[in-house]
Image: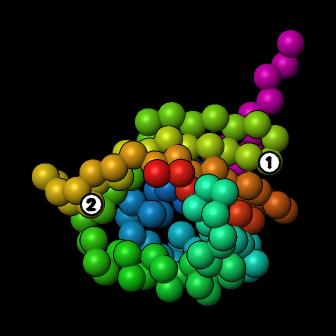
Amino acid sequence: MTVQINPNIDIAQKQLDAYNAQDLDTYMTFFSDDCVVSGLNGAPTETSRDAIKARYAKAFAQFPRNKAVLKNRVAVGNTVVDHELVVRAPGGEQFEIIAIYTFKDGLIGRVDFAK
């Protein structure tokens, strides 16, 4: 039996690394122009790469020591699901989140968050 590595896992990890480095320009290269961000089963909160960039520019400015620690990752087809522990600052607010990434044409086309 041959095990194939899902290429979307690499993209998911690279975008997480860019997020943790707060490297907004690199982070944005992993999203499609028409990417949608939403709460799970909710209405979209962002519907373009520009809107996502504005969201994370604000978040990075507000939480300059924010990090997401990957607790688990599952990939099936065009979907990668990350379970993360987000730490706003050492000793600060923490919460767990599930990020469901849907890929299209090698980029993240949709993100649904469950918190």
Residue 78 is marked as: 1
The crowd level at tag 1 (other Cα within 10 Å; few <14, some 14-19, many 20+) is some
> Does residue 50 sit above or below 66 in this rendering?
below
Which range is magenta? 1-11
Q: Residue at x 33, y 49 (%)?
A: 95
* Location of residue 85 with respect to 63 vertically, above or below: above
Q: Which colour style is shown?
A: rainbow
Image coords of residue 54 (percent x, y):
50, 85
Magenta span has 5? yes
At 28% across and 78% down in the image, what residue appears? 62
Name the element at disc 1: loop
Taking the magenta stretch, the answer to whether it contains residue 111 is no
Q: Is residue 24 left or right of residue 66?
A: right
Q: Name the residue nearer the viewer: 28 or 74.
A: 74
Q: Which mark is residue 9?
A: none
Q: Is residue 3 positioned above or below 28 on the image?
A: above
Q: Which residue is mark 2?
A: 88
Which quarter of the image is occupied by the N terminus? top right
